[in-house]
Image (spheres, rainbow, N blue to C red):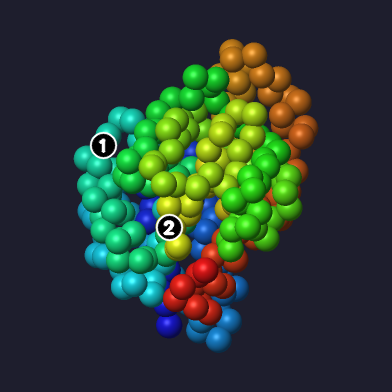
C-alpha cells in the first residue's frame, strides 16, 4: 500500500482555518475517498516548519507539498533544508506534486529561480492553457486544453529548471505547471481550493489588488468552482495507488 505524505509548509488565514480548515485539510478532504476505498492509500501530514526535514519516502510512495504564506525567496531555514531533500527524493523516484509554494520550492530546488512576479499578484478564478507537452502529459493531460483554476500568489517560478517541461501557462505566468521527471510535477494553481476558500482569499487581498489596478469586486464575482483542476489531486493519488511508475 503506497503512502502519500502531505508536507505542510504554512498556515492559512485564521478565519479560513476556522471556517474551512487549514492547507493540509483541503488536501485531506480531496483525497479522503481514495484513502477510504479498499485501503488503497495511506495519508500522513508532516509540518516541515516544526518537525524538520521529513524521512525520505520509499520509491513507491508519494509527496504533496502545500501552499504557504511564506516566500521561497526569503530562504527560511526550514524551507532551504527541504531543497536537498527534494533533490534526493526525485533521484529516488518518489512521486511528487508541489502546489503554489510547493511549485516554487521544487523549481528552486531543481535549479530554477522563484521570486516576486514583476506583474504583481494573480488572484481569483483564472483561465490556464495546456501546452503541447501538457496535453500529452499522463497527469495534466486529462484536463481540457483551456481550463479554470484557483490562484493566489505574488511569487512565481521566474526561470524553469534545466530540462523541466512546461505543461501549462497563461498571460500572467509562463510556468503555471512543470514536470521535472517521470513522477515529479508542480503547479502554481490550487487544485485543493474550493470557490468558498477562493472568495475568502479575495476578501483578504481586496486592498492590495485594487492598489495594483485590479477590480476586486469583478474578481469576486468571477469566482467559480473548478472541478477539472480540482480533479488533479485524485488523479495523482489514483495513479500512485495503481502503479509505481505513474507514466
**Residue 76, disc:** 1
**Quadrant of the rendered image containing residue 4:** bottom left
**Does residue 46 lie above or below 159 as drawn?**
below
Query: Of residues 89 and 19, which is closer to you in this image?
Result: 89
Q: Earlier in the sequence, mark 1 or mark 2?
A: 1
Query: Of residues 35 and 100, which is closer to you in this image?
Result: 100
Residue located at (22% from left, 47% from top): 81
Which quadrant, please, contains the N terminus?
bottom left
- Label 1, label 2: how far apart the Cα atoms are: 26 Å
> Secondary structure under badge 1?
loop
Label 1 environment density (alpha carbons within 10 Å; few <14, some 14–19, many ≥20): few
Residue 50 visible in the picture = no
Please state if 222 lies on the left or on the right of 62 as rendered. Answer: right
**Does residue 89 lie above or below 134 as drawn?**
below
Residue located at (49% from left, 39% from top): 13
Residue located at (63% from left, 45% from top): 131
Residue underneath mark 2: 181
Amino acid at each position: 500500500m503506497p503512502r502519500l505524505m502531505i508536507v505542510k509548509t504554512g498556515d492559512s488565514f485564521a478565519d479560513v482555518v476556522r471556517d474551512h480548515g487549514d492547507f493540509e485539510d483541503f488536501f485531506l478532504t480531496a483525497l479522503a475517498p481514495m484513502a477510504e476505498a479498499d485501503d488503497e492509500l495511506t495519508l500522513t501530514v508532516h509540518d516541515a516548519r516544526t518537525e524538520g526535514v521529513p524521512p525520505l519516502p520509499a520509491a513507491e510512495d508519494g509527496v504533496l507539498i502545500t501552499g504557504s504564506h511564506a516566500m521561497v525567496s526569503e530562504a527560511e531555514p526550514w524551507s532551504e533544508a527541504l531543497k536537498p531533500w527534494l533533490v534526493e527524493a526525485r533521484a529516488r523516484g518518489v512521486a511528487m506534486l508541489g502546489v503554489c509554494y510547493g511549485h516554487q520550492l521544487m523549481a528552486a530546488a531543481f535549479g530554477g529561480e522563484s521570486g516576486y512576479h514583476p506583474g504583481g499578484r494573480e488572484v481569483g478564478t483564472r483561465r490556464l492553457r495546456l501546452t503541447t507537452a501538457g496535453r500529452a502529459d499522463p497527469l495534466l493531460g486529462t484536463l481540457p486544453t483551456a481550463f479554470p483554476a484557483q490562484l493566489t500568489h505574488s511569487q512565481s517560478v521566474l526561470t524553469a529548471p534545466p530540462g523541466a517541461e512546461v505543461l501549462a501557462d497563461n498571460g500572467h505566468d509562463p510556468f503555471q505547471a512543470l514536470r521535472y521527471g517521470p513522477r515529479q510535477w508542480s503547479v502554481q494553481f490550487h487544485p485543493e481550493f474550493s470557490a468558498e476558500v477562493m472568495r475568502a482569499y479575495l476578501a483578504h487581498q481586496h486592498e492590495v489588488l485594487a492598489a495594483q489596478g485590479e477590480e476586486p469586486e469583478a474578481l469576486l464575482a468571477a469566482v467559480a468552482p473548478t472541478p477539472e483542476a480540482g480533479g488533479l489531486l485524485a488523479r495523482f493519488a489514483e495513479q500512485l495507488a495503481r502503479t509505481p511508475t505513474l507514466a
